[in-house]
Amino acid sequence: MATYKKSVGMWGAHDLAGGDPKLLLDLARQADAAGIDQLNFTDHVIMSENTGVYPFGDFPVPPQYPWFEPLVLMSMIAGATSRVRVATGVLIAPLRPAALLAKMAATLDVLSGGRLDLGIGTGWQREEYDACGLPFEGRLERLDDQVRAMRTLWRDAPATFHSETVNINQLYSLPMPVQEGGVPLWYGISPTPENARRIAELGDGWVPIQSRPAFISEGSSLIRHAFEEAGRDPDTLRVRAVAPPALNEQGEPDLDRIEEVIEPLLEAGATHIEFLPYMYVRSADDFPHFFERVAAL
């Protein structure tokens, strides 16, 4: 089996402690000690009752469900750990002003010792944009402006960048990220030819919305080709795929059969596999075994 990085999606883990977020800190320490490579956190700034427009099936929770702001949460996680990387999957980046997000990400990267991976996307909920005073239309182009501005701020001091939605003229944003080239950006967007070129120009990785190996393979190939056309080494592309549930003969989740669902993802081009604890964990006491089993794969 090819080598790969192990990521754990932390969404909903605190539900096993009655919603107490302190459990997330305990779990982060366990994951860090076990050798997990990355912890992944999700984002919603605000939530409407109009979840029926969610484009990827039934929305998993009611609108009253609490969503912790991931950059704030990850600062606590980074402070409680020493080696595991912290990541978003994905942050609805255009809801934050470019200069503010650049500063928050750079600060977290510095304080964590260069352990931040920033997964970014545009979201699906118009109400979030309305609540933040931003147009829903043109959000992908706004993301382009934002990323180009952030990369400028992470490179230049003073920095100058002008676009339709961002204007920075001879301004300073320090500290800069400690990671060479700035914070790695993983795009959670559809693998169209245009988006492949976007990732090749501005990004470092791709977060597929589907776990089907054929979908990941087609998207990875498209983006790798765009990397080549942009003069970049396609082997540097990072792809984080969510492992589908591994089931036994009775159709029940079985962590001991997880390798059976990993191999097709690696063959399709995944470099990182994200494991979702809620498929296998029924109480907080189950997490140590879960982390050790995943780390040992």
Image (cartoon, helix red, strand yellow):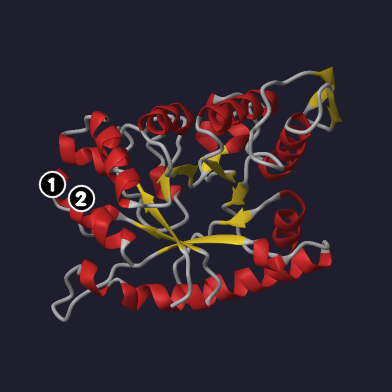
Is 64 or 262 nearer to us in this picture? 262
Q: Residue at x 65, y 29 (%)?
A: 102
Residue furthest toward the top? Answer: 171
Q: Amino acid at mark 1?
A: Asp
Q: CA distance from mark 1 to mark 2?
A: 7 Å
Whether residue 80 can be seen here: yes
Residue 25 lies left or right of residue 174; in this view the side is: left
Report the residue marked by disc 2: 288
Give above or below for 7 relative to 169.
below
Question: In the rendering, at what x and y percent does residue 200 appear?
Answer: 74, 58
Badge count: 2
| SS state under label 2 | helix
Q: Quadrant of the C terminus?
A: bottom left
Q: Quadrant of the N terminus?
A: bottom left
- The label shown at residue 295 is none
Q: Residue at x 78, y 68 (%)?
A: 228
Q: Amino acid at mark 2?
A: Pro
Q: Residue at x 40, y 48 (%)?
A: 52
Crowding around mark 2 (Cα neighbors within 10 Å: few <14, some 14 to 19, many 20+) is: some
Give above or below for 78 relative to 209.
above
Do the residues bearing badges 1 and 2 touch, measured as CB atoms within 8 Å? yes
Crowding around mark 1 (Cα neighbors within 10 Å: few <14, some 14 to 19, many 20+) is: few
Residue 32 lies left or right of residue 157; in this view the side is: left
Whether residue 11 can be seen here: no
Report the residue marked by disc 1: 285
Q: Nearer the viewer, mark 1 or mark 2?
A: 2
Q: Residue at x 52, y 67 (%)?
A: 270
Question: In the rendering, at what x and y percent does residue 35 appear?
Answer: 35, 52
Quadrant in the rendering for residue 98:
top right
Question: In the rendering, at what x and y percent does residue 137 appear?
Answer: 67, 41
Question: In the rendering, at what x and y percent does residue 138 appear?
Answer: 71, 41
Is 123 or 131 nearer to us in this picture? 123
